[in-house]
Each structure stands twice: as structure tokens, then as C-alpha cells.
Image (tube, rainbow, N blue to C red):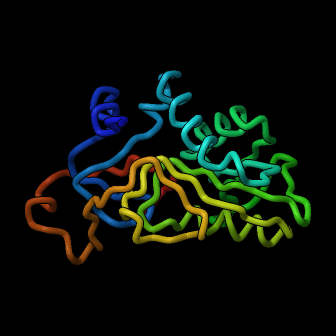
Amino acid sequence: MTDYYEIFKKTGALLEGHFVLTSGRHSASYFQCAKVLQYPEHLNQFSKEISDHFSAFDIDTIISPAVGGIVIGTQVGSTMNKRTIFAERENSEMTLRRGFSIDPGENVLVVEDVITTGGSVKEVMNVVESAGGIVVGVAVIVDRSNGSVVLHENQFSLVPMEVKSYEEYEIPESLAKLPIEKPGSRSLK
């Protein structure tokens, strides 16, 4: 069995401190998946595990939210030999740009690096469905909700774990004493 924690620690992808997550919640730990995905052996391993899980599904396209999901989504698309696109924010709204499109009836797998509340994935799912596409599943590397956030009936995560996160009004004193870092890809106010 793969020791994902060891891989994250070894590659410097598991950070400790006081972080404001993309969701706006605060946490004492942060998974910087880009740091682990820079190593081809881990990128290929994670992509193969996701691809193997969804191999029996009828998938036309892989889509990921920018920026965090692009690397893993692209590699999953390559592994599965499927078209790969991404959605990104424009005026604070997730949208398709750069000439990307989804046809009505197109079967789409959403691939993301990390979820806490699943907000970005939900937005991408809405983009797919608004275009008439069909979301056939959701794949993530790290599910910080330990499976409590259910985005789709065909949801798969390599690393389901419960990582405590807090609203700003409920931050423990020990965490509040640490300087705040905002390493995520979405700017927060």
C-alpha cells in the first residue's frame, strides 16, 4: 500500500503552520500538491491510479479547475488518451476560456488536486452542466474532508483524510498565534 504521507513529506508537499485555504477556512496543515507532482514518478503513479479507477467509464474529456488541478488533470488525460481542458476564473466566476468548449452530451471527468469544501469542483461541474455536458465522475488526489464532502456519486480520492479546518471565528489560540500564509491559487480578501 502506498504511503502517501511519506511521499508528501519527502517532497515537501505537506506544510505545517497557519494557512488560509482556498475555501477561506484556516488550517494548521496545507497540501501543496504541485510540489509532489513535479516528480514524474509520483505524477505518473497518481495519474495511473485515477485512470485505472475510471477505466470502465465512458469518458470523452478531462476537465480541471485552474490552477491546482491542471497538472494532474493533464496527466490523467494523457494516461487515458483523452482530450484535456481546464476552467479558470474570469471576473471571479469559473468559466471556459482559451477556445475550450464542451459539447452537449459530452462525458466529462473532473480532476482536482485537493478539496476541502469542494467549492472549485462544484463550480467546474456547473460549467460542464451549463454547456450540456455530463459529469461522469470526480477524482481528487487529497480529500481533506475524509469523504464527508460528496460532490458526485462516482467520486474517488487517492488520499481521503480528515484535516481540521476552522472558520475565522473559531480558530484555536495556538493556531491564531502563528503568522498566516495563503498558498492557494485563488486570491482571498
Place of residue 158 in the rendered image (x, y in percent of width and height, measured from the top left) = 45, 47
Q: Residue at x 79, y 54 (%)?
A: 58
Identify the image quadrant of the C terminus: bottom left
* Residue 106 against residue 67 in the figure, above or below: below
Tally of numbered tags: 0
* Residue at the extreme left: 174
Judged left or right of residue 112, residue 13 is: left
Q: Nearer the viewer, residue 62 or 153?
A: 153
Q: Residue at x 49, y 31 (%)?
A: 37
Q: Nearer the viewer, residue 55 or 104?
A: 55
Q: Residue at x 32, y 48 (%)?
A: 30
* Residue 34 against residue 66 in the figure, above or below: above
Identify the image quadrant of the N terminus: top left
* Residue at the extreme top: 40
The quadrant in which residue 107 appears is: bottom right
Judged left or right of residue 135, residue 104 is: right
